[in-house]
Image (cartoon, rainbow, N blue to C red):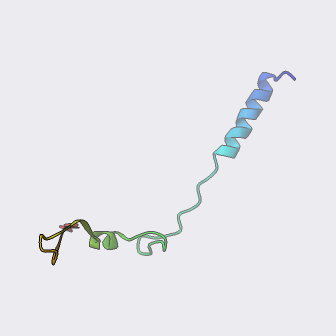
Amino acid sequence: MRRTSRDRVLWLVSLAALTISPLPAHTQTASTPAKDRIALTDYLDWEDVAAPSLSPDGKLVIYTRTVTDKI
């Protein structure tokens, strides 16, 4: 079956109509964060602990601790 230029245009318009759909409206406001996301204030309170190492006598653990400066 041979396609005409009109058929191609109709096909492209149909494809564009299917692929370009309006995005859903954002329902969350800035004062109400979504339940499945972390708030910026919580993220800034996180601390990271890494690189544990035992002291020579084995009584202490030395590690690095990373915090975020909130200035």
Of 31 and 46, which appears nearest the observer? Answer: 46
Q: Give residue 29's position: percent from left, percent from top.
A: 46, 70
Q: Residue furthest right?
A: 1
Residue at (34% x, 69% y) in the render: 40
Residue at (71% x, 33% y) in the render: 12
Q: How many marks?
A: 0
On the picture, is 41 further left or further right than 67?
Answer: right
Of 62 and 28, which appears nearest the observer? Answer: 62
Classify residue 59 by image quadrant.
Answer: bottom left
Q: Residue furthest front?
A: 57
Residue at (29% x, 71% y) in the render: 46
On the picture, is 6 further left or further right than 44?
Answer: right
- Vertical relation: 2 (above or below) 37: above
Q: Give residue 15's position: percent from left, percent from top.
A: 71, 39
Residue at (31% x, 72% y) in the render: 41
Of 60 and 44, which appears nearest the observer? Answer: 60
Of 22 and 56, which appears nearest the observer? Answer: 56
Q: Give residue 49's position: percent from left, percent from top.
A: 25, 68
- Vertical relation: 18 (above or below) 10: below
Q: Which quarter of the rendering shows the C terminus? A: bottom left
Q: Give residue 1's position: percent from left, percent from top.
A: 87, 23
On the picture, is 36 further left or further right than 38?
Answer: right
Classify residue 64 by image quadrant.
Answer: bottom left
Q: Residue furthest bottom?
A: 59
Classify residue 23 by image quadrant.
Answer: bottom right
